[in-house]
Image (tube, rainbow, N blue to C red):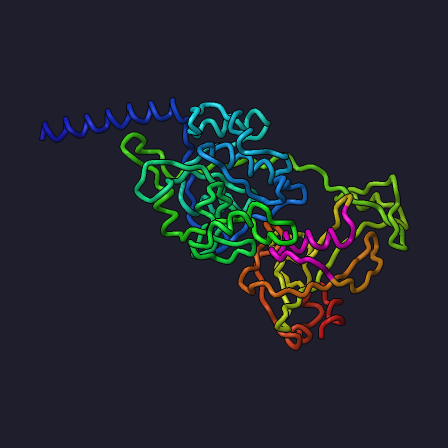
Amino acid sequence: MFIAWEIIKFILNVLAITTIVDIILMGPLFPHFEKRAKRSKFFVSPKKETVRTEAGSFFEFQEGGGCAGFSSAFVLRHLGENAKGDEVFKEVPFTYGNGVAFPKGITGFFKKRGIKMKACCGNLAALQNELTHGNPVIVVIRSFVGKSFLHFACVTGYDEENIYFADSIKDWVNVDEAGNLIKSEETSGAESASESSSTSEQKVYYNRVVPVAEFKKLWNTSMLKMPLYFNIYFAMSAPAESKELWDAYNSNLEKIEGLTLVRGEEEKIPEGVYHLVCEILVRHTDGSYLLMKRDPTKPLYPDMWEATAGGSALQGESPVEGAMRELREETGIVSKSLEKLDWSLGKTCIHCRFLCVTDCKKDSIIFQKGETCAYRWVSAEELLAIPDEELVGWQMKRFVK
C-alpha cells in the first residue's frame, strides 16, 4: 500500500511539473467543453472583404515549416487584411528558425493586431460551435496519426462525416475547386489549380477533407512531454460590430451620390430615398426550387420558410454584386451569373429580384448564423401550393415555372 501511494505521488508530481513547464513554454489552455453541436453542419463563407492571394486563390502553400504563420495569414485574409504566410511567420513570437511555433505565439501575434485569440482545450462540439461564429478556427493537429510532429491548420467547416480544412501543405490537398474529392495521383494537379483558381472557379472555402474519426486521432496531441495539451483550438473574440452602410437610391433605381444610409436607422431615411434589397429565387437544373428556413432569432418572420435568399446590398455593391454575396453567404451557392427578374419600390427599400439556376449538389447547402437554419428542395407544384401567408417572399411565385 505504501509503495503504491509513493508511485501515485511520484506520477502526480511529474504531471504537475510537466504541466507547469508546458504552460511556461506553450502558454495556458482554457478548457471549453460543450454538450452538443448547435448545427449538424456548418461551413464558413468568405466575407465581402476577404482577400485572395496574388494568384487569385483563397489558399497559399508553405515550403518547409511556418504553418503557424500560414494559418494565421489565412485568418487575416478572411478578415480583410492582405497577409502572406511567410511574412506573418516572421512576426509570430516564440518561434524557432526551422518553422516551429508554440501556441502562445499565435495568441501573442493576434494580440499585437488588436484581436483577442484564446487557446482552448475542448471537445468536438466546442470546436464546431466556435466555427458557427463565422470565422476560420486554427487547430493544432498531428501531421500524421501516431506521429509527434505537430501542425497548425484552419478548419472552415464540418458535417456529420467530415472536417474541412484550409490547409497550407500542398501534399494534403484532396479536393478540387468545386469541393469534389480527388484521387491521390491527381493531387499535384489539384494543388496548382487550388493556388491559381479565379473567383469564378473556386467554389469552396476548403482544400482538404478529413473524416471525423481520423480528425479526432490527429487532434489528440497528448503525449508524454505534454499530457494535458490536446484538442487545441483558438477561439477568436468577435470584433466590435461596425455599422452596416448602404448606398442611397431614388425611385428610378439611380444612385444618389454623397448620401449614405445606415442599417438600424431606417426611420431617418428621407422620403423618396431607398436602399437596395436583393432577393434571389434558386432553381435547380432538375426543376426543383430551394426554400430556406429563417433563423428563430430573426426579429421578422422567425422560423418561417422563405422562397428567396437575400438581404440588403452593402455600400459600394451593385444590385447583382449584393445578390451574389447574399446567395453565397446564406446558401453556399456560388453563381457566375444571375438572371434579372424585376424590381419594385417598398417603403424605404427597392426590391431587386433575381433568378439563380444552379447544378450544385443538393445536399451542399450551408446556413448563415442568425439568418437561416434549415433548407429543403420542392417541386414547382409544391412551391405554388404553399399559402402566401406561410411563405416569406411569396411574391416570387409568379416567376415559378
- Horizontal side of 26 relative to 388 (left or right) equals left
The relative height of residue 375 versus residue 173 in the rendered view (above or below) is below
Name the one closer to the observer, 174 or 159: 174
Horizontal and vertical percent position of residue 263: 75, 44
Nearer the observer, 346 or 27: 27
Is 71 on the left-hand or right-hand side of 15? right
**Considering depth in this image, is 43 or 373 the residue closer to the camera?**
43
**Which residues are drawn in magenta?**
317-338
Left or right position of 259 against 373: right
Where 153 sits versus 292, above or below? above
- What residue is at 19 percent from the left and 26 percent from the top? 9
> Is residue 62 highlighted in magenta?
no
Query: Where is residue 228 shown, x and y percent of the image?
Result: 33, 33
The quarter of the image holding the C terminus is bottom right
Residue at the (64%, 62%) spot, across then down: 304
Coordinates of residue 262 in the picture (x, y in percent): 78, 42
Marker count (numbered): 0
Classify residue 233 by image quadrant.
top left
Image quadrant where one finds the N terminus: top left
Residue 330 part of the magenta-drawn span: yes
Looking at the image, which is closer to me, 210 or 310?
210
Q: Residue at x 76, y 42 (%)?
A: 245
Against 137, residue 350 (above or below) is below
**Residue drawn at (75%, 49%) of the image:** 313
Res. 222 image quadrant: top left
Classify residue 261 by image quadrant. Answer: top right
